Image (spheres, grey):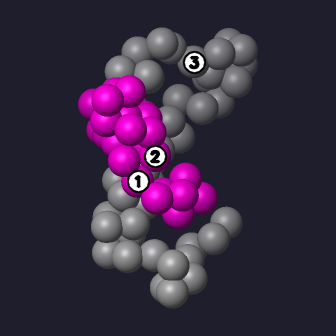
Amino acid sequence: MLTHPNPRHYTPDHEAFRATVRRFVEREIIPHAAAWDEAGGFPRALYGKAAAAGLLGVGFPEEDGGTPADHFYRL
């Protein structure tokens, strides 16, 4: 896993978003991953939680419900 991205391409905003994603995964996904694997799926409510955290629609225009961002946010 990449723990130290190339600083030439990432801004403080990129790093803040990366930290948000990491916190979300640690809090909302990791504790439940084994059970979801066993069940063969995850709850739809996870989409709502991801949206509330600002993790959905990254890189898509605001008029389409997204959050404008460069392609480095999706790496």
Query: Relative to residue 5, is residue 22 drawn left or right?
Result: left
Task: Single out the residue that lies furthest toward the left.
Answer: 52
Q: Work out how far the residue at label 2 is from the one at label 1, CA to CA, in angstroms.
A: 4 Å
* Residue bearing the label numbered 3: 42
Query: Relative to residue 67, is residue 1 drawn left or right?
Result: right
Magenta residues span 51-75
Query: Looking at the image, can residue 4 be seen?
Result: no
Task: Report the amino acid beneath label 3.
Answer: Phe
What residue is drawn where x is 36% and y is 47%?
Answer: 68
Q: Position of residue 21 (x, y in %)?
A: 42, 50
What residue is drawn where x is 36% and y is 21%?
Answer: 48
Give the quarter of the image for residue 3. Answer: bottom right
| CA neighbours of label 1 inside 10 A, class few (<14), some (14 to 19), many (20+) | some
Q: Work out how far the residue at label 1 is from the one at label 3, CA to CA, in angstroms.
A: 27 Å
Secondary structure of the residue carrying tag 3 is loop
Do tag 2 and tag 1 residues touch (Cβ < 8 Å)? yes
What residue is drawn where x is 36% and y is 58%?
Answer: 17
Query: Relative to residue 66, is residue 71 drawn left or right?
Result: right
Q: Work out how far the residue at label 3 is from the one at label 2, CA to CA, in angstroms.
A: 24 Å
